[in-house]
Amino acid sequence: MFPFFYDPTFILIIPAVIFAMYAQGKVQSAFNKYSQHKAGIGWTGAQLAMDILQKQRLSDVKVELVGGHMTDHYDPRNKVLRLSYKIYHGTSLAALGIAAHEVGHALQHDEGYSMLSLRNMIVPFASIGSQAAFPLLFIGLMLGSQSLAQLGVVVFMFAVVFQLITLPVEFNASSRAMNILADGGYITVNEERPVKKVLDAAALTYVAATVMAILQLVRLMLISGLLGRRSD
């Protein structure tokens, strides 16, 4: 068993931590840069979202202001699209891109997009897995119960599956956003590239989260003995 004060498997997640920091810096840099680029249409993110929803006949979806920075999200249970202050009131290319991305999730929900439905189904299990995995692993190692430690690893797998399913959901929402913005005449041809950079940078954070989850799973499998043998 690895002593608790010395865990050589921690080195496995160092690349993921570095990648996550890079991705976070990338999205912040892109957001800050293109928040300074005002969109030619002159609309706010909220106006854009409401217009698209109306044209897509999603009048039952509300658009609300939410606190925090980059806390934008679509709530499928209440059919509410929540935008942070800089997106809700912003008229920049960054604001329009992110608002359109969240509308993309509303469209996925309305159409019954299979990957979104699957992600919504696994949310409770992923939440339990991410919260219970480490306590189970720790208690199992403390008590010398390999089965309990390995149970912690198994429940953590739900969190990993959630991250894997999230990737196509987010990429699809961004693809929908670009098509809507370009085909709907909301942005010009010259504005497409900046908007795409913002969405691509945001997508990179989900890739980083997935890499982190996978490497963390490998690490926990090594610690618990599910993968290879550990020295006493």
Image: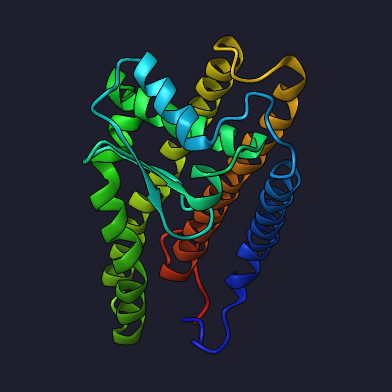
x%, y% of residue 14?
Answer: 67, 65
Return the residue nearer the eye: 218 or 31.
31
Determine whether 109 is above or below 133 in the image: above
x%, y% of residue 107?
Answer: 36, 23
Return the residue nearer the eye: 27 or 92.
92
x%, y% of residue 101?
Answer: 50, 32
For residue 187, which quarter of the picture?
A: top right
For residue 64, which quarter of the picture?
A: top left
x%, y% of residue 63?
Answer: 35, 38
Colour scheme of the rendered structure: rainbow
Q: Relative to 19, is 122 on the left or the right? A: left
Total tally of numbered discs in the picture:
0
Return the residue nearer the eye: 181 or 51.
51
Q: Relative to 172, is 121 on the left or the right? A: left
Q: Relative to 136, is 104 on the left or the right? A: right
Instruction: Work out which residue is located at the far top of the displayed protein and give it.
Output: 183
